[in-house]
Amino acid sequence: MSQETKTVNRNPRRDSPRLSSVTTAIHLLKTFTETDTELGISELAKRLGVAKSTVHRLASALLDEGLLQQNAANGRYYLGIALFSLGSLVRSRLDVAGESKYLLNKLRDSSTENARLAVLERQQVVFLHDFESNQTLRLKSGTGQIRPAYCTAEGLCLLSGLHEKELIEFFKLPREARTSKTVTDEDKIRHRIMQIKRRGYSTEDEECEKGTRCIAAPIYNAEGRIIAAVGIAGPRVRIRKSQFSKIAPTVIETADLISERMGGRKWQKIYV
């Protein structure tokens, strides 16, 4: 073991008698270092300043979730593979944001509309990029803004990549109408998800913001999971509904190029 023992940062909340198990579990995970890759119950309890029984209970829960693993030979714990998976998701977001900049700017210039990149954050989408159109009449950049997934073109693309269990959890939460055109009915949203899987893109017709239309397509990672969505958005006076099918191939092509940069595949039609 390293001679230097890591000292966990202390704060008032941690020293409170009402210390939450979640906070303690987080501190437990942070106790592991590059030099102290394996730690036993006694050492963890000492460093955290809590009872061994508490550490044992938390370690067992983290073990069940794959956040910790246990060395069968000595009973000591080390960080689990599930943390690597979570870290990969964060890295994917950072990577896709960087890899997409050039292609989004190119899409913005060719379409003369806003080019956007969004990822799913629980039940909402976060716009990592929103490059404004150069036209006088244009949408204001929404970079960093959050929108409901069920009423944005990018959000619907991201929902199409969820497993059924994830969709069930998604639909448990309330969905409010943002405009008179917002679709909130579960069956209708599911129908739209099936359409996206068949044709490779989604559309938005003033369902999130009045006067705004959007066409979006999904981006895939190396594992074949949808990790982001690219879209072009603009005012309804320029983006006509009759043009959706003509604009879509350009958006899909951009999404495919970003997917390739992420080691993913191009969109393939799913017969559902």
Image (cartoon, rainbow, N blue to C red):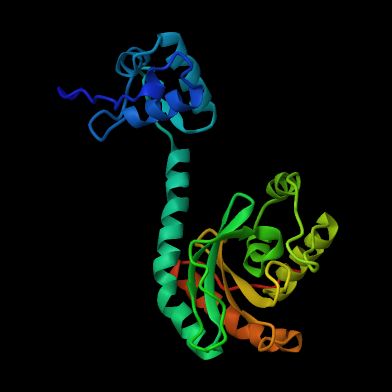
Where is the C terminus found, in terms of image quarters? bottom right
Q: Is 259 on the left or on the right of 5, as rendered?
A: right
Q: Is residue 13 visible?
A: yes
Q: Residue at x 26, y 28 (%)?
A: 36
Question: Closest to the observer: 215 or 15?
Answer: 15
Question: Closest to the observer: 243 or 11?
Answer: 11
Q: Is 58 on the left or on the right of 174, as rendered?
A: left
Where is the N terminus found, in terms of image quarters? top left
Give percent across and percent down for residue 146.
57, 58
Q: Which quadrant of the view contains residue 38?
A: top left
| Labels in figure, total | 0
Q: Residue at x 46, y 21 (%)?
A: 59
When the figure is inspected, residue 261 is found, relative to residue 20, above or below; the finding is: below
Give percent across and percent down for residue 76.
36, 20
Q: Is residue 71 visible?
A: no
When the figure is inspected, residue 129 is found, relative to residue 162, above or below; the finding is: below
Q: Is 225 on the left or on the right of 195, as rendered?
A: left
Q: Residue at x 77, y 65 (%)?
A: 182
Give percent across and percent down for residue 5.
20, 22
Q: Which quadrant of the view contains residue 14?
A: top left
Give percent across and percent down for residue 260.
48, 72
Most distant residue in the left direction: 3
